[in-house]
Image (spheres, rainbow, N blue to C red):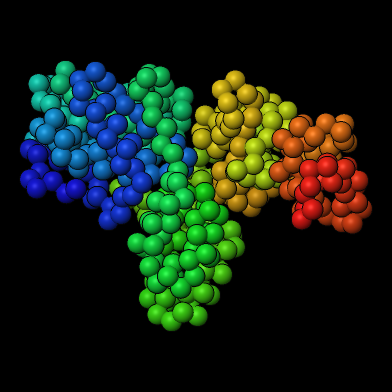
Amino acid sequence: MQPEERPPLWAGVPPLPGHFLGREALLDTLVKQLTNGQTLALSAEGLPGVGKTTLAVALAYHPQVLKHFGDGVLWAGLGPAGDPRLALTEWGQSLRADLAGAVELADMQRAVQHLIGQRRLLLVIDDAWELEAAQALRCGGPNCCYLLTTRDKGLARTFAGAAGMTSVPVLAQDPAFTLLQKLAPEACAHDPAAAAALTQAVGGLPLALELLGGYLGAPERHLFPDLSQAALAELADPAQRLRLAQQRLGGRGPAVTLAETIQLSLTGLPDGAADAFYAMGAFAPKPESFSRAAAEAVTAGDGGILALLAARNLLERAGETGEERLALHQTLADTARTSMPDAAQARHRAYYLAAANEDRGDWRRIERAYGQIKWAWRHAPDSEALIDMFWAIHRHQHRRGLWRD
C-alpha cells in the first residue's frame, strides 16, 4: 500500500506496518467517508492497543485517499502530554514557513491556515487526549478533512459529531490467528491449538498479537520445536504477556509494555475510577457479561464512574440496546487483576452467591449469571466458600444437565 509517488506534502506520517489484516471492510468504509465530501471530521476510537493508529496510517497511504487529497497529508501525533504548538511548527516547516516568531497559539493557527489556503489536504490528529489540543490543529482550509484517533468516546463525539465516530473493533478469531501465523509461523505450526488459545486469551487485540508474534518469532524461541513449546507455555501466563513491550507506532519515546499501554487510559481519571477499574478484575471477562448492579456492588463505584470507564473504552456495553449489561475485554481484565483488591473478589463472590440463593428455581435468571457464578466458584478461597456455592447452584446444574460442571 506504499504510494508509488508521494504527494507534494507528506509530513510526519509513520511508515506503514508490515502486517495489516482483518480490516478490509472497515478500511473501505472509512475511505468512502473521507472522500465523499460529506464528512468534515472523522474520529476513530476504541480499546487501547486496538490499532487506531495503524488504521489511520493505512488510510494515509490508501491510493484513493491520496488521489482525493492530492496535495498531501499532514500528521500530528499528540499523546497524553501532546503539544499542539510543536505540531503546528512542524506543519509550518512542511509548508516552508518558520513559525518561530509566532508567540500565541492562535497566531500559529492562523499562519498555518493561511499557508494551507485552498490546498486539498488530509490532516491526521493521532492519539488525542485533550479536546483543546485537537481543536488547535483544526486549522485547515475549506478543502481539508480531518482524521482524529483517540481513546476517549466523549472527545471523539465532540470533535466529529455522533455521525463521524467510528469504533475500531478487535480482530475476529480467524484474522487474529492469521496475524499470529504471519508473525510466528514456526510456533503456530508446531502447536496450532496453543497458538489459537493465545489469540483467544488476548481477545483478538492487535497490539497484544503483535507483541506475542514478536516474542514467539524470535530465532532463539523457534529454531527447535521444544523452544517454541516453551515460549508458548510462557505466554499462557497473563503476567508474562503484559510485560511484553514495543515502541508505539509513530512514537518517539521508549518501548512501552502492554500493561502500561492499557494503564495509560486511566490518566486524568479521578482516583475512584482507577480503583473501580482494578476492582473489575474480579469479574469473568468476555464472553461473559454482568449487570450494572453487579458492577456497582463489586467496584463500590456508581453509574458515573462506570460511565467514565466506558468513555475511555475500559468497559464495554454488552447485549441488546437498552440493556444495562457490561463486559470486560480479556486483556483489560488481565491488567485489572494486577492490582485488584482482595475485597473486590470477596464482593464478587458475595454478590453472585446472593443472586444464586435469591430464587434457586428461577433458572433463566441464574442462567444469565451462570458464567460469573462459575467464576466465583473457581476463585473461592476455601472449602467453606466452595460448599456455599455448591448448595446455591447444584439444583440449577442438575436441572440443566450441567454434569461436567
Q: Is residue 137 left or right of residue 248?
A: left
Residue 231, image x, y percentages: 50, 71
Taking the image as shown, residue 227 lies to the left or right of residue 298, namely left
Q: Is residue 159 visible to us here?
A: yes
Quarter of the image where one finds residue 276: top right
In the rendered image, which quarter is residue 201 located in?
bottom right
Q: Residue at coordinates 52% horizontally, 49% vertically from top-left?
A: 203
Q: How many marks?
A: 0
Image height check: is 259 above or below 104?
Answer: below
* Residue 275, x across and y down, in percent: 66, 39
Is residue 126 shown above or below 339?
A: above
Within the image, what quadrant is residue 78 found in? top left
Note whether residue 376 is visible. no
Which residue is drawn at the image coordinates 79% and 47% (left, top)?
A: 401
Q: Is residue 64 left or right of residue 325?
A: left
* Residue 86 locus on image (x, y percent): 27, 37
404, above or below 340, in the image: below
Q: Residue at x 83, y 31 (%)?
A: 362
Side (left or right) of 344 relative to 149 = right
Vertical order, 198 against 128 (above or below): below
Q: From the top left corner, tell me how far across and down residue 252 is, in percent.
A: 32, 50
In percent of the image, x 37 and y 50: which residue is there? 248
Between residues 112 and 50, which one lies in front from this camera angle?
50
Viewer-closest of 393 and 363: 363
